[in-house]
Image: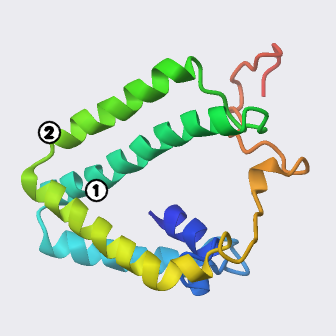
Amino acid sequence: QTRVFFVMSRDGLLPGMLSKVHPKYGTPHVVTIITGVGVAISAAFFPVGQLASVSNGGTLCAFFFVSLAIMTLRRTDPDRRRAFRTPAVWIVAPLAAAGCLLLFGFLSFVAQMVFFGWAAIGLVFYFIYGRSRSNVARGITVVGELDPNVPPQGVAPLPGIHTPGGKDA
């Protein structure tokens, strides 16, 4: 969640203080502290199973829209440089979206209603705050992954693990 809030803040959808990076450690410390306090308070007052169901609703929604976005970008921007590939996108993405909907349907009614309540609050916040302050609204279209100078973001293999080139990392 901290990564989501950090990027939303960086993109102007949340207050800029949430994307401040610690000068020594290079981590988004403000959003990490705020999110940690929110999670601690939630864990103190709600059953963990209910919290898991509610968070699953948000995760399933995010994966659903990622699946739709992958198909949309393949259609509208086929030449876009991609940091990763999705094999058989026209099979995998619709199945993923359908699977997310199916799993969402199996969540408890309370978890579904909490999800829709938070979604409504998020939409109100977006229209009051984020819509006018977003980078898109201000005409800023910086897309970091398209910068040719950005190195690949993959994780290096563990020492002693064979790489495709046949050498140990």
Q: Quadrant of the C terminus?
A: top right
Residue receiving disc 1: 55
**Position of residue 72 measured from the top left corner of the image (x, y, whole percent):** 57, 38
Residue receiving disc 2: 106
- Count neighbours of disc 1 (C-alpha within 10 A) and say few if under 14, some if 14 to 19, many if 20 or more: some
Closer to viewer: mark 2 or mark 1: 2
Tell me, for residue 30, which label it has, or none: none
Mark closest to the chain's N terminus, 2 or 1: 1
- Label 2: which secondary element: loop
**Position of residue 21 measured from the top left corner of the image (x, y, whole percent):** 67, 77
Q: Is residue 39 above or below residue 115?
A: below
- Label 1: which secondary element: helix
Q: Amino acid at mark 2?
A: Phe
* 40 and 117: which is toward the camera: 117
State the image quarter where residue 103 is shown.
top left
- Count neighbours of disc 2 (C-alpha within 10 A) and say few if under 14, some if 14 to 19, many if 20 or more: few
Judged from this view, the residue extending furthest toward the top is 166
Q: Could you tell me if residue 34 is visible in this image? A: no
